[in-house]
Image: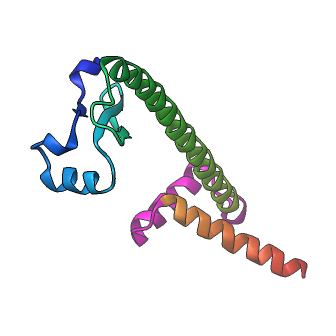
Amino acid sequence: MTLKEHHTVHIDDMSSETRGPEFTSQATERGVHSLLSIQLFVESKNLGALNLYSDHAGSFSEDSKEVGAIVAQHAAVAMFSSAAENQFQRALATRDVIGQAKGILMHRDKLTGLQAFATLTHASKDTNTKLVDVARWLVSEHESRVTGSLA
């Protein structure tokens, strides 16, 4: 998909704009007289918009649109990469706590890894609770018992 297939809004003069009369009226009252809004996207994923405002009508030229599109592309890639990194970190943390819960069950109940995981998934389904939340509860209970016995 190219930038041309995505939506860019350019309002050269808010006072003569007919689309969104409430928005343009409110913007003008606040000193906004020109707008350039460029969709932020990566592949087909919409991430929002880069909105540029000016206190003068006619502020955004064709060069402004081109530079704005380049900045928007870079911003979208950075946002997408950041979101992917956050998702990866959450997945690692989830995997870790589920592994700890499996280990507790394996040791406590003398189960194999598959049996321990099956026990966790059954508890998740039976209680209508996310698997990771069941695992967190089990690990927390285990740690509180261990901490209590050390006191």
**Does residue 7 appear to the left or right of 76 in the view shown?**
left
Q: Residue visible at 33% across and 51% down? A: 31
- Count every numbered label the image shows and give the total: 0
**Does residue 127 appear to the left or right of 115 in the view shown?**
left
Q: Residue visible at 71% across and 65% down? A: 108
Place of residue 113 in the rendered image (x, y in percent of width and height, measured from the top left): 62, 49
Quarter of the picture containing the N terminus is top left
Q: Residue visible at 51% across and 37% down? A: 84
Quarter of the picture containing the C terminus is bottom right
Name the quadrant containing residue 39. Answer: top left
In this picture, which residue range is highlighted in magenta? 107-130
Q: Residue pushed farthest right? A: 151
Q: Is residue 66 magenta?
A: no
Q: Nearer the viewer, residue 25 or 5?
A: 25
Whether residue 76 is situated above or below residue 99 in the rendered picture: above
Q: Residue pushed farthest front? A: 56
Q: Nearer the viewer, residue 44 or 47?
A: 47
Q: Is residue 120 magenta?
A: yes
Query: Magenta span: helix, strand or loop, mainly?
Result: helix
Q: Nearer the viewer, residue 87 or 150?
A: 87
How is the protein colored in the picture?
Answer: rainbow
Whether residue 80 is situated above or below residue 43 in the rendered picture: below
Q: Residue visible at 27% across and 52% down? A: 27
Place of residue 48 in the rendered image (x, y in percent of width and height, measured from the top left): 35, 41
**Does residue 70 appear to the left or right of 102 in the view shown?**
left
Name the quadrant containing residue 29. Answer: bottom left
Q: Nearer the viewer, residue 88 or 140?
A: 88
Place of residue 3 in the rendered image (x, y in percent of width and height, measured from the top left): 29, 20
